[in-house]
Image: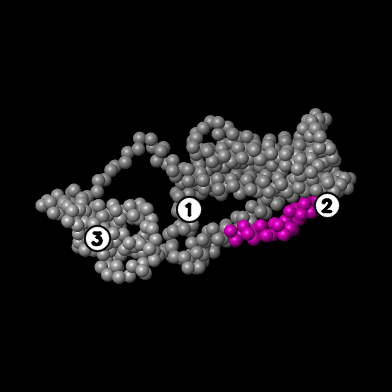
């Protein structure tokens, strides 16, 4: 009997993995992750240059190039704009037809407005650059006005020095809101989104596989050889094995992407996806997420595995009561709604920090796996509370399995699509 159970499990797992679809999708996922993590280096290899500075040629006819350059560089640095290179070239007008992406700024004297300027470019100047140039020219004009006013150098320095505003935030929590929102987005993307995708894939495969066996009348042959309980457990175990294998592959693809990035990364690249990933990694590390992840690794792993089992139990039970994939699609709608609710609540957890309602939802099975990890890694749930959520999910999974098996025994040989919910309730009562 054990050999039959093992055969059913391996056969079901093989049907999910030994397919062209599985292999093609995984190759594409691997390539996609490698491309995303190494986008900057790949683009540069094909001619893109993140290190290329924007060149601004200045034709200075007022003798104030140094002041203008300092003003421009100070503003660019303040707004963290891409690095620029400002070059004094009074002959720049002679090469107007060859400026491409560069800009020429001509500064002339004016009898009415002290100075006047012209900005020359091949394409339209970006609005940000235009405003920076205007601001720098206005600062230069102010400097010239003050110098011709007869004021001393010390007075001019005081008048032209920028005002330093000291920021005082009364709501201390508001200082961390932006960081918390970004951190929440990273956590949900890394932990929740893969789980969501894997669950959807598992549910669809379970429904398709069980309905295929029922529609081909192969179910009768299978159930005549093994018990409905063993058949049920084989489907759950095969589905769990599938999502663990797929999840492990995704993890390996991520590691491979990082290794490739280290090998082909271009020194000095601060723009693009590579720079963003480095910044996010630094921010996550500083927030203490890795420390919490290390402490709660075992409870989190158990929560994910048990939740996979729980979703597989529910999906297999719903599939057993249907005779075709169309009916199963209707029955699985509540399952998808539960997942969507959990996903959006996990995202909103940072907006309602300390919400008792959200903390209660973190203990509800099927929702807990989407909410509890986010709350824990964001510091909104203690390790003890996380363990409590895991225990509640484990107990609920066992209870649901007990009653789901009764439905499965009745539904697996049921070929009528009428009064499905009534049959489910009847089978539960009958087994009680």
* Residue that badge 1 annotates: 281
* Residue that badge 2 annotates: 3
* Residue that badge 3 annotates: 107
Percent position of residue 186, x then y = 52, 48
Residue range of the region highlighted in magenta in the rendering: 8-32
**326 horizontally vs 180: left or right:** right
Label 2 crowd (10 A; few <14 / some 14-19 / many >=20): few
**Alpha carbon of mark 1 to alpha carbon of mark 2: how far?**
47 Å
**317 horizontally vs 166: left or right:** right
Is residue 118 in view?
A: yes
Look at the picture and state if 218 lies above or below 359.
Answer: below
Percent position of residue 391, x then y = 64, 37
Q: Which one is earlier in the sequence, the residue at label 3 or at label 1?
A: 3
Verify whether residue 324 appears in magenta: no
Q: Quadrant of residue 124?
A: bottom left
Q: Residue at x 27, y 70 (%)?
A: 91
Percent position of residue 389, x then y = 61, 37
Evaluate if marks 3 and 2 touch, with contact meaning CB atoms under 8 Å apart: no
Q: Secondary structure at mark 3?
A: strand
Q: Which mark is residue 190?
A: none
3 or 2: mark nearer the eye: 3
Q: Which one is earlier in the sequence, the residue at label 3 or at label 2?
A: 2
């Amino acid at each position: 009997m054990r050999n039959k159970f093992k055969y059913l499990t391996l056969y079901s797992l093989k049907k999910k993995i030994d397919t062209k679809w599985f292999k093609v999708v995984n190759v594409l996922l691997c390539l996609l992750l490698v491309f995303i993590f190494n986008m900057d280096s790949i683009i540069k290899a094909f001619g893109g240059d993140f290190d290329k500075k924007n060149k601004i040629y200045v034709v200075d006819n007022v003798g104030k190039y140094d002041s203008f350059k300092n003003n421009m560089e100070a503003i660019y640095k303040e707004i963290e704009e891409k690095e620029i290179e400002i070059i004094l070239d009074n002959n720049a007008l002679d090469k107007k037809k060859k400026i491409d992406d560069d800009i020429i700024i001509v500064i002339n004297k004016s009898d009415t407005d002290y100075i006047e300027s012209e900005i020359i470019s091949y394409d339209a100047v970006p609005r940000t650059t235009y405003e920076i140039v205007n601001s720098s020219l206005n600062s230069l004009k102010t400097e010239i006005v003050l110098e011709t006013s007869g004021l001393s150098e010390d007075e001019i320095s005081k008048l032209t020095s920028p005002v330093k505003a000291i920021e005082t935030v009364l709501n201390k929590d508001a200082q961390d809101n932006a960081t918390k929102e970004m951190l929440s987005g990273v956590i949900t993307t890394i932990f929740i989104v893969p789980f969501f995708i894997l669950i959807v894939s598992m549910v669809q495969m379970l429904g398709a596989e069980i309905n295929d066996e029922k529609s081909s009348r192969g179910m009768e042959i299978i159930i005549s050889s093994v018990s409905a309980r063993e058949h049920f457990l084989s489907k759950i175990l095969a589905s769990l094995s599938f999502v663990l294998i797929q999840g492990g592959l995704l993890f390996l693809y991520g590691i491979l992407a990082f290794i490739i990035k280290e090998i082909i990364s271009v020194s000095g690249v601060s723009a693009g996806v590579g720079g963003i990933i480095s910044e996010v990694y630094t921010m996550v590390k500083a927030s203490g997420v890795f420390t919490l992840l290390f402490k709660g690794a075992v409870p989190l792993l158990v929560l994910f595995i048990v939740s996979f089992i729980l979703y597989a139990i529910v999906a297999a039970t719903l599939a057993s009561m249907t005779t075709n994939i169309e009916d199963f699609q209707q029955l699985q709608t509540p399952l998808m709604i539960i997942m969507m609710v959990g996903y959006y609540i996990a995202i909103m957890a940072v907006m309602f920090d300390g919400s008792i309602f959200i903390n209660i939802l973190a203990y509800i099975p099927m929702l807990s796996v989407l909410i509890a990890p986010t709350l824990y890694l964001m510091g909104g749930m203690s390790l003890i509370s996380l363990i409590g959520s895991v225990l509640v999910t484990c107990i609920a999974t066992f209870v649901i399995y007990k009653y789901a098996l009764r439905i499965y025994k009745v539904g697996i040989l049921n070929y009528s699509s009428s009064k499905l919910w009534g049959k489910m309730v009847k089978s539960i009562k009958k087994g009680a």
